Image (cartoon, rainbow, N blue to C red):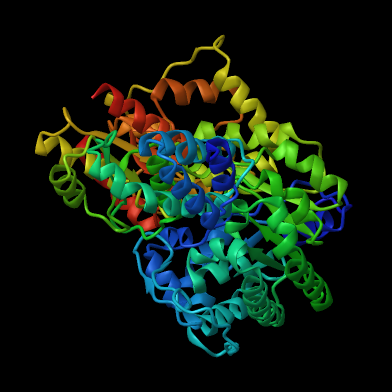
Amino acid sequence: MREHMTGKERIEAVFRGRNADSIPWVPFAGVHAGKLAGYSAREVSTDADKLVESLRKVHSLYRPDGMPVMFDLQIEAELLGCDLVWSEDAPPTVSSHPLAQTQTIPSRLPGPDEGRLALELEVMARVKREFGEQTALYGLFCGPFTLASHLRGTNIFMDMVLDPDYVHSLLDYTLQVSQFMARCFSEAGMDVLAVVDPLISQISPEHFREFMHTPFSELFGYIKELGAFSSFFVCGNATMNIEPMCQTGPDSISVDENVDLAQAKRITDSYGVVIGGNIPLTTVMLFGSQQDNMKAAVQIIDSVPPGRLVISPGCDMPYDTPVEHVLAIEQAVHQTHSVREMVNTYEGSTFAFTGTLPDYEHLQRPLVEVFTLDSATCAACAYMVEVAKEAQHHMDIDVDVVEYKYTSTENIARCREMGITKLPSIYINGELAYSSIIPSRDKLIEEITEKAAAT
Amino acid sequence: MADMKMISELLQKGRAKEVRELTQQAVDEGMEPQDILEQGLMDGMNEIGIKFKKNEVFVPEVLIAARAMHAGMGVLKPLLVEAGVKTRGTVVLGTVKGDLHDIGKNLVGMMMEGKGLTVVDLGTDVSPQRFIDEARTHNAQIIACSALLTTTMKEMEHVVRAADEAGIRGQVKIMVGGAPVTDAFCKSINADSYAPDAASAADAAMEFCMVS
C-alpha cells in the first residue's frame, strides 16, 4: 500500500480486495454538478462545455476518488423513442413509453454519434484527459430492467406474471443496448461501468432469479471482458435482492438508505463484492445540518467492518444539496478520525466557550475570520483561506485574517458561540459574508472595503 | 357454497378468471354482495397489503392481485350500486405537479380500493388547484399526494396551502407519501398524514374516513 494514493488507486485497490490508505469517496453529483458552476440541470444535461466546467468544480471541491460523468438514466430511453420532460433542477423524466400499447421487440441499436450519448462521450473523453489519471471515472447507464420499463411502461410488471416470454425477449434486447453503452463508455476510458437499475428493488428475489439473473450475469461478464470494473446500482428497499444481485457477478453494488448497509455488507463480503452507500439523500444531505452529514458518514463507516467499502450518497444527489454538506462528508470519509472527534466534541455537553469573541463593534481594522473544517485537508476550505489571504495581500488598508479550524475543541465552541453552522465560511467583522461558495479575490476585496467604510 | 377463503387466496395469487367465476358463483348462490366483497375480495387485498408492508410481495404481485380484485368487482359493482351500498369514503389521489411517476401512486390507489374506499385517480402532474377542485366535486374526505422527486415533493406544500385558502381543511385531510417524503417533512408542511407504504396509506385513509 502506498502512503498517499490517488483516488483512482484507492478505488482500484478496494475493487481488487486490497487495502487503501483511505476509504474511497464517490459523490454522485449528477445535475448537482451544475449548481457548483451556476448552471441549471437542463444546461449540464445538454451542453458539453457547461458540463465539463461543472465537473471540474466537482473534482476540485469535493475531492472525489471516483466520480460519475453523468447520472442520467434517460439517455438511452430518449435515443429509443421515449419523450422526455425537462426540468431546471432535476434530470429529465421519461413521459411516454413506445411499447405501452404493443408487445413488439425493437431491434435497432443506437449509434455513438446519436443524441445526448454523443455529448456524454465527448465529455468523458475531455474529463478523462483532465483528471482521469488521478480520479476513477464512472460511466453510468440505465440497467436492462429499468430501460425495459422506460420502453414498456409499468405494464412490464404485469407482463412478468402474465407473459413472461415477452419480458425475457424485451430484456434480451435491452441487454444488447446496455452492452452497447458499456462498450462506448469503456472505449471513452471509463474505469467503472455502473449499471443503474433502480426498479430492481420493486421485484421479488424469485422474479429476480427468473428474469434478471441471466441478463445481468451476461452484462457483468461482458464488462469484465472489456477490462473495466463493474458496479450494480439500485435504489429503494432492495434488501431482499442483495444476494441475488451478488450472484450476477458485479465487482461492486451501490445501495441507498432504504438498505441497512451493515446487513447488506455481510452478504457482499461473503461474495467478495464491494459495497457502496448510503448517506441518506433527503433527510440528511438535503435537509440535515452540516453536523448531521458528518455524523451520518462517520456512523456508516463505524457500522461496518473495514474493507470492500465505498462511501457515496444513497443515489443521485438532489440538485439543491447544500455544498457544505458534501464537503463535510468528504472530510468524514478521508479524515474519519478527526471528524469523529468533531462530532463527539460538538455533541458532548460538557464544554463551553471560554475565550472572548472580538469586540466586533469597535475593531481597529477590518477582521476577516475564516471558519474551516480544516484547510489542510478540505479543498474548499483551503481555497477559502487562500482567497482571504490574497485579498489581504492586495488591499491598500491593513486587514486581519484569521483561520479557525473545526479540529479543535476551542474552535468548535467558538463556532457554537457565534451560531456558525456552515463550514467553510467567511465572516467579515463578525458578520457572515460567504459560506461554502468561494468568492473571487476581487469580490472579497470589494466586500471588505464596503464593511470597512461602514464602520 | 362458494368459499370466501378461496376467493381471498386466489385473489392473492392474481388469478383473475377464477376470482370472477367464484364471485359469480357466490352471487348465484344468494350470498350478499357486501359479504362477498368484505370476506372475499377485501380480505385478499388486505393480506396482500400486509405482505407488501413486510417485504414479502412486491410490485408485480400487488398489481396482479389488484387486477383479480377488479375482475371480482366487475361482478359485484352493479349489485352494490343497486343495493345502494354507500362508499366508505372518497379519496382524491394524484402525483403532484411536475412529477410523472405513478407506480407508487397506483399501488396506493389499489390498496385504498381494497379497503372499500372510492378512489378518484387524477393521474400524474396534478396541480394544487385541481386537487382542491376535484375534492370538492367528489365530496372527498381525503386528498392523497404522491411524489418521487425531492424537487417535486415541495409541491405538496402548495397543495396544503391551496386547501387552507379554499377553507376545506375542516372537511378534507391531506395525506402525503413517496420515496423522498418523511414524517418530518409531512409535519413541516402541515399536512395531515404521512404513510411509508401503500398498505399503511390505506389504513390511515380508513381511519380518517371512520371518524369523519
**Residue A81 location in percent, x, y?**
46, 82
In this picture, residue A395 sits left or right of residue A187 = left
* Residue sitting at the far front: B29
Q: Residue at x 66, y 31 (%)?
A: A299
Residue A318 in sight: no
Examine the image and state in which quarter residue A5 appears.
bottom right
Is A156 in front, or is B147?
A: A156
Is B205 in front, or is A80?
A: B205
* Residue sitting at the far left: B166
Q: Residue at x 38, y 30 (%)?
A: B204
Residue A250 in sight: yes
**Residue B203 location in percent, x, y?**
42, 31
In this picture, residue B89 sits left or right of residue B186 = left
**Residue B8 location in percent, x, y?**
54, 40
In this picture, residue A303 sits left or right of residue B84 = right
Is A19 in front, or is B96?
A: B96
The number of numbered badges drawn on the structure is 0
**Residue A134 location in percent, x, y?**
71, 65
* Residue sitting at the far top: A350
Q: Quadrant of the C terminus of chain B?
A: top left
Is A263 in front, or is A208?
A: A208
